[in-house]
Image (cartoon, grey):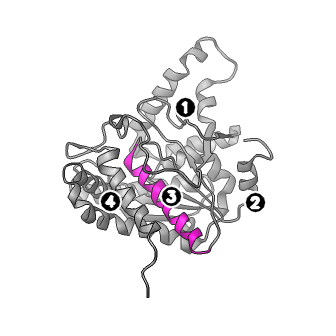
Amino acid sequence: MQPGDPLSKTLESSEKPILFLAHQGDELCCSGLLQRLRKRIRVVFMTNGDGVTGTNEEDSVRRVARRRGEALRSLGTAGVSESQVRFLGHSEVEIYRNLAKLRWAPLRLSEVAAFFEPVRQSVAEAVYEFRPDVAFAVGFQGGNPEHDLAHFFASLALRAYGRDGETNVPLYQFPEYELTILLPMRFRPWYPGEKYWIDLSPEELTVKQAMAACYSSQRSQMKRLRMVVGLLTLPQRIVRRKTNPIHRFFSREQLSRVPEDFNYQKSPYRIDFLNYLFENSQGIPLTFQDCMRPLLLSFEDRLNSPPEPS
């Protein structure tokens, strides 16, 4: 990020930024953003963190409470108070289950859309309540269906907000992961949009590491992430560069402005098999074309339909 570039100007001038996330822990990918906006930002989590595995109800309740506490401690470490955080509380288990219904029974679209309507509405309510001047969301990448849904519902809400005569709010996205390129927290090399970098200071990187340490439930995932980054930076470590390549990787965060005419009907990958690799519900693989695209089209059609006469 360079002084004078659009993102720098946005961060300096924004008074009411909002951040939309799918899961607790997603905030680690934009720690620099959080630390620089601190008291100004509002953070919205779409899901409750119950996980997509078949745990019993008691385990699920404990997991939800634990993930909520971890997220609050993580955000508090970055200087974001509990009063700035909204948990919408939608079940990951039910989200996956409903998406899977469309894989083999596309005629159930109206039923599935009805399930997702409260999700859409809760995201929209956060926008209309807070009235942001800039928004950030996890990237629409084809890596995780809930990431894409959180991004899409944020975009949908912002477009409706602008259409209703309010301010047109710019939306920025940040990448999480795509298994096909093994580059966590980076856009794919052929990503067509302009990329902005936030370079964390040593102090900001220390805070980011402290935020990650708040997620005791995610230790195995964090360990795997560091292992992947270690492999990616192995050539640099072999030649013994002065800077630590692993620290260098984690101290750079990407953002990109989402075009106003972004096409959410276009598959993130030309080959649908590459979308949502290994993502499934009770053994039913989730795909973009069968599970995601019909749902997104349904909601966009509603947004674009003329209002019913009163």
Inter-mark Cα distance, 4 to 2:
35 Å
Kind of residue sitting beneath label 4: Ser
Q: Position of residue 262 (x, y in %)?
A: 53, 51
Closer to the eye: label 1 or 4 = 1
> CB atoms at circles 2 and 1 under 8 Å apart?
no
Quarter of the rendering containing residue 163:
bottom right
Kind of residue sitting beneath label 3: Leu
Q: Earlier in the sequence, mark 3 or mark 4?
A: 3
SS type, badge 2: helix
- Determine which residue is flagged by label 1: 190
Q: Position of residue 53 (x, y in %)?
A: 26, 47
Inter-mark Cα distance, 2 to 1:
31 Å
Q: Position of residue 234 (x, y in %)?
A: 54, 17
What secondary structure do most residues of the magenta stretch adopt?
helix
Kind of residue sitting beneath label 2: Ser
Q: Earlier in the sequence, mark 4 or mark 2?
A: 2
Label 2: few (<14), some (14–19) or many (≥20) C-alpha neighbours in 10 Å: few
SS type, badge 3: helix
Quarter of the rendering containing residue 187:
top right
Span highlighted in magenta in the image = 144-165
Inter-mark Cα distance, 3 to 2:
26 Å
Q: Residue furthest top?
A: 239
- Determine which residue is flagged by label 3: 72
Q: Point out the image quarter for the N terminus.
A: top right
Confirm whether residue 117 shows in the render: yes
Q: Nearer the viewer, residue 21 or 78?
A: 21
Residue 91 circle label: 4
In the figure, 11 relative to 212: above or below?
A: below
Q: Position of residue 22 (x, y in %)?
A: 44, 54
In the figure, 303 relative to 188: above or below?
A: below
Left or right position of 41 against 218? right
